[in-house]
Image (cartoon, coloured by chain):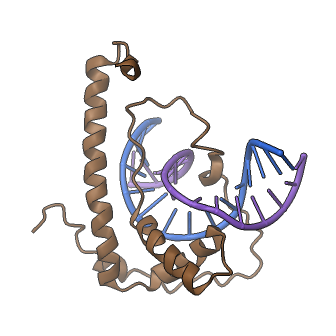
Chain colours: A brown, B blue, C purple
Amino acid sequence: MKTRSRSTQESSAHKSLSHISHSNSKPKKKNKKQAQHKSPLKVKVKDDPHKPKKPPTAFFFYLEDFRKTFQQENPTVKSMRQIGKACGDKWKTLSFEEKVAYYDIATEKRAKFERAMAEYVKRKENGELSDESEDEL
DNA sequence: CGGATGATTGTTGCT
DNA sequence: AGCAACAATCATCCG
């Protein structure tokens, strides 16, 4: 058994999913906190080269798989935004087992991330003052 | 023409 | 303990 088991998502799975948004008029007044990053791939916001990026969540893994299937069944849909909505909707309808499958991947990914983070911190403590010209290394 | 945003949920990080 | 920002992706839209 994994000590780090996701503590069984069944609890979470049984969470209240009943309150599905039934609001029609939604002025899309969502906070721009999430989409605040413009071009993350182009814009570098002073991030340390050792700073590990956040690993994709289980939802993202599902997205990858769902995206292919969705495009096959919906060749008309090209934008991933629409897929995201459909994916999110189906994601909530995913079976516990299916969710766990993706959660497991995400869990492993997190472990890897934590390790990268630990190394990052260690590196920071060790050679933060040192020149990080590893690029030329 | 080009940059920027929008949407999905989860997850991590910092305060 | 909780909030905030960010993780991919890409079509579409405004300037």
Q: Is residue C5 above or below residue A79?
A: above
Quarter holding the N terminus of chain A? Answer: bottom left
Q: Is A131 left or right of A67, judged from the image as shown?
A: left
Q: Position of residue A84 (x, y in %)?
A: 57, 71
Nearest the eye: B1 or A15: B1
Above/below status of B2 relative to A57 = above
Which residue occupies 31% across, 47% down? A113
Residue A44 location (% of width, % of height): 57, 33
A118 lies left or right of A46: left
Percent of width and height locating residue B5: 72, 54
Check the image and name the residue furthest to the left: A1
In the image shown, does A93 or A77 lie closer to the viewer? A77
* Residue drawn 25% across the image and 28% down it: A122
Instruction: State the quadrant of the C terminus of chain A.
Output: top left
Residue found 77% across the figure and 69% down from its top? A27
Image mark count: 0
Residue shown at 59% from the left, 74% from the top: A83
Q: Quadrant of residue B1?
A: top right
- The answer to which image quadrant residue B11 occupies is bottom left
- Front one among A57 and A135: A135
Q: Quadrant of residue A59?
A: bottom left
